[in-house]
Image: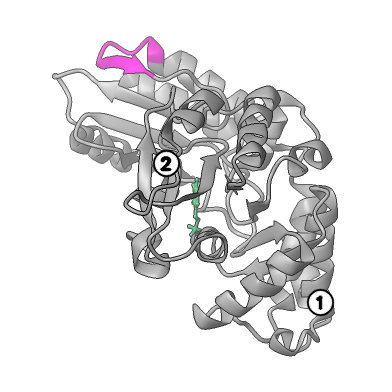
Amino acid sequence: MTIDLRSDTVTKPSKGMLEAMFSAKVGDDVFREDPTVIELEEKTAKLFSKEAGLFCPSGTMTNQIAIKTHTQPGDEVLCDAAAHIYNYEGGGISFNSGAQAKLLQGDRGRFTAKQVEENINANFDWLTRTSLVCIENTVNRAGGSYYSFSQMKEISDTCKKHKLSYHLDGARIFNALTATKDKTSDVGLLFDSISVCLSKGLGTPAGSVLLGTKEFIQRARRVRKVFGGGMRQTGFIAAAGVYALENNINRLADDHRRAKLLGETIKSLPFVESMMPVDTNIVIFTLSDKMQSEDFVNKLAKQDIKASGFGKQTIRFVTHLDFDDAMLERTILVLKAM
Ligand SMILES: *Cc1c(COP(=O)(O)O)cnc(C)c1O
């Protein structure tokens, strides 16, 4: 058995998901004639109390479209130093929107309303106009940490007070809500726009949905076309999203349980120096000087376990729906024998 802990993006569609895809009703979505895409967009929007949705090929695209739709060139976007939109989207904030980022130093990727308040520029001609605040939940680079409802709400109140747009990079929002037990319908109300990823924990082959008001999504649809993201009979892929929303959310708790158990083993290994708290489905740990991440990854590869280095001494494991209890058991045995 091959075990892949590199990312929760490595999952393959299950039999049930494939069947849903094969039997999808489709049409040309650029003409708004694909019933399955419309179904997915409406279903996701309703879940988060939003008026409308926009199906896109990737989470990077939903985030970048949101930034482009919320800002003008020369504006400033407030985000955490660990943010995916800043670190892992190819410089898209400046490339696509001509905007710049101001990085806040949060607690494991989570900043506060007070930090937002302190970093809003005053209204002078020579200062950059602050127009957008982006949070990420859960925070990938910070080991899957999540925001509480009140933390998100306080930032929302601050944004309203200062007329800033508020975007949620929810690539792993269902992991966050599995941990906090907050309702999607309550969380959705806090934000002007939300990126919801279907191809990570939820296990579809591709796709993210951007959510917002009807007016916002109408403008975002134009930007999607300009970015080259207008797709045609994409209901085949959207059907996987509908299936995932119906079948793959409740099981995320299993991924969290398995990540916790992995963490307990890892913490006790003699060649592990430190580990971030395991809050959801991500385990990030740092090796001692005795072992470099490349050696560690190579040793695991020999045992048919794939992992990825996250820096010279650091490793990230991510649990997902193609990582079951038998694989967990085997991984723990291999780690203990190293
Ligand atoms: C993966 C990820 C994205 C973007 O996803 P892609 O679909 O790979 O473009 C955005 N934000 C976060 C936090 C992610 O982990």
Query: Which percent across, then down, holds residue 37?
Result: 77, 73
Q: Residue at x 85, y 54 (%)?
A: 46
Q: Residues within 10 Å of mark 1 (few under 14, many from 20)?
A: many
Tell me: residue 91, above or below residue 259.
below
Residues at discs 2 and 1 in contact (Cβ within 8 Å): no
Which stretch appears magenta? 267-275
**Image quadrant of residue 177?**
top right
**Residue 272, relative to residue 5: is it above or below?**
above
Q: Residue 120: x and y, percent?
A: 46, 38
Can residue 269 be found in the magenta stretch? yes
Residue farthest along the left direction in this orientation:
289
Residue 142 appears left or right of 302: right
Location of mark 1 (residue): 24
Residue 44 falls left or right of residue 309 = right
Distance in Å between CA atoms under marks 2 and 1: 49 Å
Mark 1: secondary structure: loop
The residue type indicated by label 1 comes to Ala
Which residue is denoted by mark 2 in the rendering?
Answer: 121
- Say which element carries label 2: loop
Q: Residues within 10 Å of mark 2 (few under 14, many from 20)?
A: few
| N-term mark: 2 or 1 | 1
Count how many numbered circles sit on residues in the image: 2
Q: Residue furthest front?
A: 124
- Which of the two residues, 19 or 154, is positioned nearer the viewer here? 154
| Residue shown at the point (79%, 61%) measured from the top left | 242
